[in-house]
Amino acid sequence: MGGNQAQLSGPDFTEGVEIDDVPSGGLLLGHAGGEAVILVRPVGSDEVFAVGATCTHYGGPLADGALVGAQIRCPWHHACFDARTGEAVAAPALSPLSCYTVERRGSRVVVGAKRAQSAARRRPERSPESVVIVGAGAAGTAAAEMLRREGYESPVTMIGAEPARPVDRPNLSKDYLAGTAPEEWVYLRDESFYDSAKVELVLGARVVALEPGARRVRLSDGTTRSYGALLLATGADAVRLPIPGADGPRVFTLRSLADSRAVIAAATAEGARRAVVVGASFIGLEVAASLRTRGLEVDVVAPEARPLERVLGPELGGFIRSLHEEHGVRFHLGRKPAAFEKDAAVLDDGSRLSADLVVLGVGVRPSLELAERAGLEVDRGVLVNARLETSVPGVYAAGDIARWPDPRTGERVRIEHWVVAERQGQTAARNMLGRGEEFRAVPFFWSQHYDVPINYVGHAESWDRIEVRGDLAARDALVAYRRGRILAIATVYRDRESLEAEALFERSDDDGLERLVAGG
């Protein structure tokens, strides 16, 4: 996370460049005042904008991204920025880009001073008397920030069961766990943000009852909070296996900052050499990679024939297995743990794997109990309409618990992706304020295994055919998932094609998707 600053290269924009050097519908990298800057020229326009060249999410190089209309899109994790204002218009970035003055001198474009950040004053169409957000994760944090950005001035309360302020959860199994990112990078916002935004952050407290008739929630400490609008963003809970020893002191799940700290403490304890990871899920394999980076021997136990085959198919699953084996991970596939002992995991065939620690990555369950007890419609998730409103007016749901109508397939889906959760939180916030906006964002997630990123756009719960274009072994490939039409595309080191696929899905451009895959 963070810190990969774009190198100063290209022209000095303070000396000016010809406007024809800025491609129509494209980006030009250069610098101004000692900082990396990109010039942006929307299609069919002679107007040029200048903004910072580094994504405010993880520091991705925006010059390698794409321009869609007037939106700059980051190649790494698909954050979207308004080229005219620098505003972060779609997660995972929440902070804006720096903007610079631009002057036309004949046929040349000259960049001047950095402009002061001043968000346009907005007035909500509707203003609930207060907003309560249940859950202090991705969706909840993005919603709170968006409420203030949209000009909402009444009280906002965010309630989180964990004692730590909201964190960047994907980093808990990646760089932070691997020891390559410091803890200060893990938090989504520093403490001053919540004070300056006037967001009441109630941590270490659970909401034990939702009372829609009275429009209030009851907390575990006995207090209540009233609301005019409410967002349920309770997320999901890690699954623990019902086998002997699963509650032992060296058996961990990984969902919170406290969980990640506990795994790190066990992995760095004196004498710790071997870890067993149960589950070849994204979390499980990211944990395996992080623990290998720390120098531990790692065994992965999973019941399937290939890692991630159910999600990514046999081709990409086989590639991921080979990648981990290149880094020394040992797989025990087709096996399940039967018990955990003090220094070993016992498998269902009677074999024993030495283990100084065990990490369970066997999935999560959406936290639905609160919604069920309150009488909200629930079916394998909290049912919401296209505007993310539940069966109870004024109550919205977002993130891991929400099941919404997928505009591409017409089916209801529930997706456990970080970027989806953030973008749903942003949409729900705007709808609380009267926008009436349908959630139509294309699902996106990324997974990092050592130095190899995998980007995935769209959503395919099942498929009848998978097409691989390029060479997975060479780490240069595009994988298309079809059920008749193309439903999802995964890429390995093809960031631009991933961005292009996202834009094509947004336009429901099936012909364009076919051309993209055929050209792969």
Image: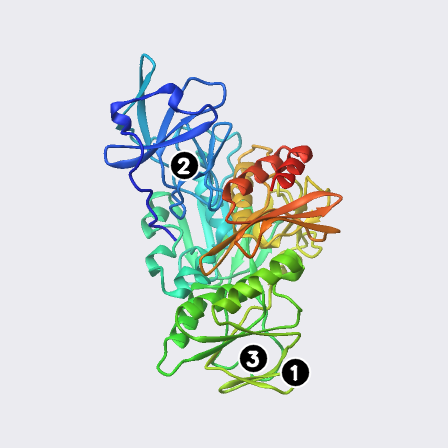
10 Å crowding of disc 3: few (<14), some (14-19), many (20+): many
Dot 3 amino acid type: Ala
Binning the other alpha carbons within 10 Å of mark 2 as few (below 14), some (14 to 19) or many (20 upward) gives many
Task: Identify the image's colour scheme: rainbow, by chain, secondary structure or one colour.
Answer: rainbow
Question: Mark 3 — residue?
Answer: 246
Amino acid type at circle 1 is Asp
Report the mark closest to the observer, 2 or 1: 2
Q: Position of residue 229 (x, y in %)?
A: 55, 43
If the image is split into quadrants, where does the C terminus sit?
Answer: top right
Question: Do labels 2 and 1 touch, CB within 8 Å?
Answer: no
| Residue 269 horizontal side relative to residue 252, left or right | left
Residue 56 percent across, percent down from the top left? 38, 43
Q: Nearer the viewer, residue 517 or 14?
A: 517
Residue matched to label 2: 63
Mark toward the viewer: 3 or 2: 2
Mark 2 to mark 1 CA distance (whole Å) = 51 Å
- Choose between 444 and 190: the one closer to the eye: 444
Kind of element beneath mark 1: loop
Q: Which mark is residue 242?
A: none
Question: Which comes before the other along the chain, label 2 or label 1?
Answer: 2
Q: Secondary structure at mark 3?
A: loop
Which residue is nearer to you in this view: 307 or 20?
20
| Residue at the image position 41 percent from the left and 27 percent from the top | 40
Q: Which residue is mark 1?
A: 348
Q: Whole-percent x and y of residue 120?
A: 40, 28
